[in-house]
Amino acid sequence: MSKTETFRRLHESGCFVIPNPWDVGSAIYLEKLGFKAIASSSAGFAWSQGRTDNNVTLDQLLGHLTALAAAVKIPVNADFEDGLAVEPEGVATNVAKAARTGIAGLSIEDSTRGGGEPLYAFDLAVERIRAARTAIDKSGTGVLLTGRSEGFIAGRPDLAETIKRLQAYAAAGADCLFAPGLTNKDDIAAVVKAVAPKPVNLIGGPWITVKEIADLGVRRISVGGSLARAAWRGFSAAAKEIAEQGTFGGFTGPKLDLDSLFG
């Protein structure tokens, strides 16, 4: 099967984890751990470039997705932010470019990234998803489309509005639905029920286990920028110790044989 076919099969039943690498090396490492698919992280990639989240260019993002997809044999889902455009026509143009990078899926979010309103107006947000759907269909790639509603992380944590948007995105052609920031189990279950039978993605964290998430009916689990933050945390602690204390305690512990891993 192609990567897109494999990715679609994963969404048909059960629950699977798509961890988020930030570069080619971390993507290969996750593949070698046995994960069945991975997802890019807009934040993780931006930090690796010395930029803030949602502050990379379209060409940079397309290059990153191309590199990730070529580096691994498993499907890659793209965090394609807001499509890097406001109007549906621009979203369609950019999604068509992303679909040619070798990815198996991509997500489009409805956050305005700090505009006057935290979310795109409802009708515009739906048209943006519909435009992405049309672009993917025209590409013939079979890329799986995820519709994201960002209210719970963009200052509008309204469950009813979130469900209304996700249902509309599903009707507009989204294959999978995603509301980052959900942590209440009753809210998660309500979203799963509201968009069924379409699958739901949830960001996992220390507050819940994979089994508990699966028991709620969630099909797909991602971790956003958390793996990148964990890597930066270890790097930062070791580097600060050298700079501030003149000691090297951060280098203790098991040694990763990365040459063997990547060889």
Image (tube, rainbow, N blue to C red):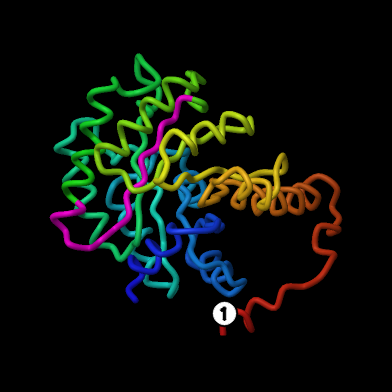
x%, y% of residue 123?
23, 23
Residue at 52% from the left image edge and 31% from the top image edge: 190
Q: Is residue 177 visible?
A: yes
- Residue 71 drawn in magenta: no
Q: Residue furthest top?
A: 116
**Residue nearer the viewer, 230 or 31:** 31
Q: Along the horizontal axis of the image, is 95 left or right of 246?
A: left
The C terminus: image quadrant: bottom right
Residue at 25% from the left image edge and 30% from the top image edge: 126
Q: Amino acid at mark 1?
A: Phe
**Residue nearer the viewer, 181 or 62:** 181
The N terminus: image quadrant: bottom left
Q: Is residue 68 visible?
A: no
Q: Along the horizontal axis of the image, is 86 left or right of 111?
A: left
Which residue matches tag 1?
262
Mark 1 neighbour density, 10 Å: few (under 14) some (14–19) many (20 or more): few
x%, y% of residue 26?
55, 64
Label tally? 1
Which segment is the magenta one? 136-151
As helix, strand or loop, the secondary structure at mark 1 comes to helix
x%, y% of residue 27?
51, 65
Q: Is residue 12 above or below residue 185?
A: below
Q: Is residue 36 above or below residue 235?
A: below
- Residue 142 drawn in magenta: yes
Residue at 21% from the left image edge and 53% from the top image edge: 136
Q: Quadrant of residue 122?
A: top left
x%, y% of residue 128?
23, 35
